[in-house]
């Protein structure tokens, strides 16, 4: 019911090596809606993740994203910037830069989504982190790794007594406002130590 766009270039579809899919009608409308038949709500990825130009250009990109076929804009938490984007979109609408039929269709999708969400019962949040969730997390983690090839037969690791393992990990850091990786502690070395002291 909901698709998020990506700020990546899809030049085979757009003919442009630097036009993000979020802003490309060839992707958001022609591919997603027409060719794939998606009828739900489309939302942009974060406009403040610095994959798109920031500053005044954000307003232009917000308009382009809506013209491309996005229903919702994932806006910045900065209220001043969000107000600038909103003012630009309202001004663009007043200048008739948006197709009225497309706006009505978008409004219909948003209204349907809101109605469906209003009818949904809220899940019991006490289950979060409980046994069922832990088991599901373990299953997902175990299924997430696929061994494609191991010709020398190195896996699973069979270490000689006293053998050493070197774990090289990047130091987490925040890359964009939408990426808060610096709050995640590296865990590979600890996981290896748990298996091989």
Image (spheres, rainbow, N blue to C red):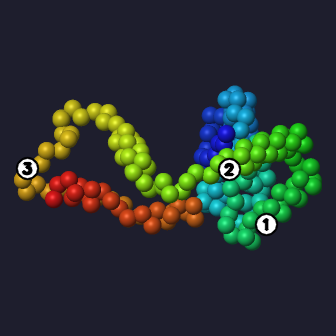
**CB under 8 Å between callouts 2 and 1?**
no
User: 166 left or right of 182?
Assistant: left
Identity of the residue drawn at 79% across and 53% down: 63
Could you tell which of marks 3 and 2 lies nearer the N-terminus? 2
Residue bearing mark 3: 160
Quadrant for the C terminus in the image: bottom left
Identity of the residue drawn at 62% across and 52% down: 122
| The one of 184 and 66 positioned closer to us in this rendering | 184
| The one of 40 and 176 positioned closer to us in this rendering | 40
Residue 183 image point, x, y percent: 45, 67
Residue bearing mark 1: 84
Alpha carbon of mark 1 to alpha carbon of mark 3: how far?
63 Å
Residue bearing mark 2: 44
Identity of the residue drawn at 65% across and 48% down: 121
As drawn, 14 above or below 161? above
Alpha carbon of mark 3 to alpha carbon of mark 2: how far?
51 Å
For mark 1, does the 10 Å Cα neighbourhood hold few (<14), some (14 to 19), or many (20 or more) residues?
some
Point out the residue furthest to the left here.
161
Task: Please identify the quarter of the rendering in which residue 94 is found.
Answer: bottom right
């Amino acid at each position: 019911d909901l698709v998020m766009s990506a700020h990546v270039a899809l030049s085979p579809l757009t003919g442009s090596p630097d036009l993000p899919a979020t802003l490309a009608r060839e992707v958001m409308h022609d591919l997603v809606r027409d060719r794939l038949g998606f009828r739900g709500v489309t939302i942009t990825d974060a406009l403040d993740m610095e994959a798109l130009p920031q500053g005044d250009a954000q307003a232009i990109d917000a308009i382009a994203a809506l013209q491309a076929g996005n229903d919702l804009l994932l806006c910045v938490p900065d209220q001043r910037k969000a107000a600038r984007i909103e003012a630009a979109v309202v001004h663009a609408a007043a200048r008739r830069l948006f197709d009225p039929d497309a706006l009505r269709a978008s409004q219909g999708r948003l209204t349907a989504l809101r109605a469906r969400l209003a009818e949904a019962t809220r899940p019991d949040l006490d289950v979060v982190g409980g046994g069922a969730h832990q088991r599901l997390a373990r299953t997902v983690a175990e299924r997430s790794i696929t061994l494609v090839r191991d010709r020398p037969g190195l896996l699973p690791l069979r270490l000689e007594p006293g053998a050493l393992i070197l774990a090289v990990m990047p130091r987490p850091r925040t890359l964009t406002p939408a990426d808060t990786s610096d709050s995640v502690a590296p865990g590979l070395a600890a996981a290896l130590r748990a298996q091989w002291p």
